[in-house]
Image (cartoon, rainbow, N blue to C red):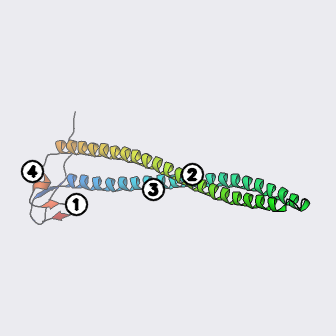
Amino acid sequence: MTTKTETIEMRCPHCGEILNIDQIYMNQMEEKYKDSYDRLVKEAVANQKATDDADIQNKIEIAVENAKANQKAQIEKLLNQIEILTKTIKNNGEEAKKSQEIIFELQQKAQSVDLEVQKKVNEKSSELYKEAKQKADEEKELEIAALNKKLNDANEATQTLQKKVRSGFPATSGRSPRTQSCKVSKRGVLLR
């Protein structure tokens, strides 16, 4: 046993055409949920970006700390060698000039190691950032594709529901409200 729900209709005060209130209500609901869905998609994308940026920053900080520790160990080793050579210079007056040259070379090496380590740190940081950004972009694309699929599914469900509503509630004039001379906007406002 099927029951039919009555369609709520109203006459336009301007033109006298009969308007389907159910259709107006459906248009308003569709617009309301579309705005909510769009807002949720934007929030999800913003949250994912913030998480990805924090992960990138954390990886860069770890790489910099590791590079600094390696650099510090190399510099300490070179400084120990310089200290040993300095003591040797004090004890051996004849080899003072030769030792000073070696000390100067070691100091030059320490400076070049420092520059080389800094260059490697910069390269590694750049590499990590690029990898993390590429991964985040791929994840965002997949998430956007999933959200678009959900939106399409929701639109199909809405269209199916509208077809069911229309088939259960035929308009009395035989025409849909959009083809009548007096139109109704999605917000339910009567237009001339």
Of the numbered discs 3 and 4, the one sitting upstream in the chain is 3
Q: Residue at x 22, y 46 (%)?
A: 162
Other-residue count near label 1 (Cα within 10 Å), few / some / many at <14 / 14–19 / ≥20: some
Label 1 secondary element: loop
Task: Provide the residue designation for mark 1.
Answer: 188
Question: Could you tell me the amino acid type at mark 3?
Answer: Ala
Q: Residue at x 86, y 60 (%)?
A: 89
Left or right: 26 in relation to 18: right
Q: Do tag 2 and tag 4 residues touch (Cβ < 8 Å)?
A: no
In percent of width and height, residue 32 lies at: 32, 56
Separation (CA) of disc 2 from disc 4: 68 Å
Separation (CA) of disc 3 from disc 4: 45 Å
Instruction: Classify 43 as above or below 15.
Output: above
In percent of width and height, residue 73 lies at: 74, 52
Separation (CA) of disc 3 from disc 1: 33 Å
Task: Provide the residue designation for mark 4.
Answer: 175
Between 73 and 166, the one nearer to me in the picture: 73
Task: Provide the residue designation for mark 2.
Answer: 124
Separation (CA) of disc 2 from disc 1: 59 Å
The mark closer to the camera, 2 or 1, is: 2
Of the numbered discs 3 and 1, the one sitting upstream in the chain is 3
Question: Could you tell me the amino acid type at mark 1?
Answer: Gly
In percent of width and height, residue 23 lies at: 20, 52
Left or right: 145 in relation to 56: left
Task: Provide the residue designation for mark 3.
Answer: 46
Separation (CA) of disc 1 from disc 4: 18 Å
Q: Residue at x 38, y 48 (%)?
A: 144
Of the numbered discs 3 and 2, the one sitting upstream in the chain is 3
Between 20 and 155, the one nearer to me in the picture: 155
The mark closer to the camera, 2 or 4, is: 2
The mark closer to the camera, 3 or 2, is: 2
